[in-house]
């Protein structure tokens, strides 16, 4: 069985699906790995390093796909890539199938067995395969650096001969993996940090990192999905949440938003009115910009100043900005999933298994995943 790793075609994508270290592990298990020439260069992994690890360098994508039984990618495939895959090819990558029905239909028509890294269940057996958490951790860390770079202030308190500098006040909205990493990073840099999440059970985690948790009393209602994500709330609860967040945003130097709901646009947590009450020079870093943003004024992929001098940053694909570690972590998660579905040197898909059954989006021209049923 031949496993193929193509060069990513999406603009500004610097990650690669496998690193030389993981290629070595796969080859040692008796499998063959082919890598498109230059696939790892943007992540600082050379063709020579892959060859030393036992991989075979293939000169172009067409040749690579022609001999592939399994294709490992980071980004979803484009039409040209799908056309190059043989029927029956197993594709493992981020697919974002819940929000891209046209792609799912194309994979069905091409008879591709497509496994989505984002579709893995959040259960203990799948933790080693959890690419979403690995990438979210990187995004949370980097978001603080992005914000600090835009903020015209120190983050820590400083006592100098010229006077005392007060620490920056940072507000993190959403205390999932990205939010918790943002909190930890901001605290390491000496900022005063507050955090909010609709899931009250994350309070202990927030406080253990040295941040204050903003509590909003709500009537009893489900605020978390079975997968551990935040759920949509009632309009009344949303309004109460916005009122309290508004008061804290006014006092914040830097706001980092991380709230996402799978398969839906990002919830709007910051209104234009809230931004209007922020101080000139304050910064918003919207990690949900790829799903439309948590701020009403976010422009995905852009940085800009509002009329009152607030800086809003809508970065896209943040993990790609740290391609070495992002590729290392992603390669480990995709390797764990690959080993889960390989038995005796061949792909074996047991759809009664919760991991395989949920993560497999299409197979034999049909939709398999329970997420899409």
Image: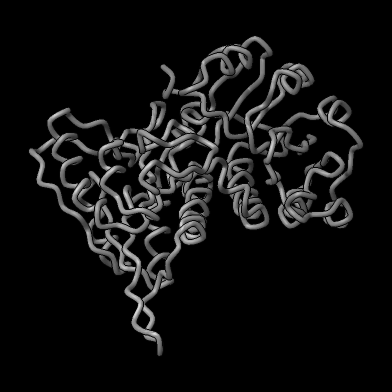
Residue 278 % position (x, y)? 29, 50
Tell me: 326 left or right of 68.
Answer: left
Tell me: 304 left or right of 186.
Answer: right
**Residue 165 sits above or below residue 2 on the image:** below
> Residue at 49% across / 42% down in the picture?
304
From this viewpoint, which residue is outermost toward the top?
109
Residue 325 % position (x, y)? 63, 57
Location of residue 81 by image quarter = top right
Asked whether 284 or 61 is in front, the reply is 284
**Residue 264 sits above or below residue 194 on the image:** above
Image quadrant occupied by the N terminus: top right
Asked whether 102 or 213 is in front, the reply is 213
From this viewpoint, which residue is outermost toward the left?
219
> Residue at 41% across / 16% down in the picture?
373
> Residue at 46% across / 56% down in the picture?
147
Residue 260 % position (x, y)? 38, 37
Residue 290 % position (x, y)? 49, 34
């Amino acid at each position: 069985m031949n496993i193929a790793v193509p060069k990513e075609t999406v603009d500004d994508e610097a990650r690669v699906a496998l690193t030389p270290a993981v290629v070595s592990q796969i080859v040692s298990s008796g499998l063959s790995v082919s890598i498109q020439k230059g696939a790892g260069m943007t992540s600082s992994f050379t063709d020579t390093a892959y060859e030393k690890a036992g991989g075979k360098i293939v000169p172009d994508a067409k040749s690579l796909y022609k001999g592939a039984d399994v294709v490992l990618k980071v980004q979803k495939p484009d039409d040209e890539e799908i056309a190059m895959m043989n029927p029956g090819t197993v594709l493992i990558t981020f697919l974002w199938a819940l929000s891209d029905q046209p792609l799912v239909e194309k994979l069905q028509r091409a008879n591709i067995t497509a496994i989505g890294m984002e579709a893995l269940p959040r259960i203990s057996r799948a933790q080693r395969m959890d690419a979403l958490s690995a990438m979210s951790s990187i995004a949370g860390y980097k978001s603080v650096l992005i914000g600090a770079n835009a903020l015209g202030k120190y983050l820590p308190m400083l006592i100098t001969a010229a006077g005392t500098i007060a620490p920056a006040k940072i507000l993190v909205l959403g205390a999932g993996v990205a939010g918790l990493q943002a909190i930890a990073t901001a605290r390491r840099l000496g900022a005063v940090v507050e955090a909010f999440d609709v899931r009250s059970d994350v309070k202990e985690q927030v406080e253990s990192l040295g941040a204050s948790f903003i509590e909003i009393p709500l009537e009893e209602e489900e605020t978390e999905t079975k997968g551990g994500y935040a759920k949509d709330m009632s309009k009344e609860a949303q309004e109460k949440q916005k009122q309290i967040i508004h008061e804290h945003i006014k006092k914040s130097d830097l706001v980092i938003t991380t709230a996402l709901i799978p398969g839906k646009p990002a919830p709007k947590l910051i209104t234009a009115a809230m931004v209007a009450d922020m101080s000139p020079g304050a910064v918003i870093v919207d990690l949900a910009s790829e799903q439309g943003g948590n701020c009403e004024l976010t422009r995905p992929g852009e940085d800009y100043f509002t009329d009152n001098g607030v800086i809003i940053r809508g970065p896209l694909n943040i993990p790609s900005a740290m391609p070495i570690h992002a590729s290392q972590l992603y390669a480990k998660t995709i390797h764990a999933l690959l080993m889960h579905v390989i038995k005796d040197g061949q792909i074996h898909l047991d759809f009664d298994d919760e991991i395989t059954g949920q993560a497999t989006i299409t197979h034999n021209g049909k939709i398999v995943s329970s997420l899409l049923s």
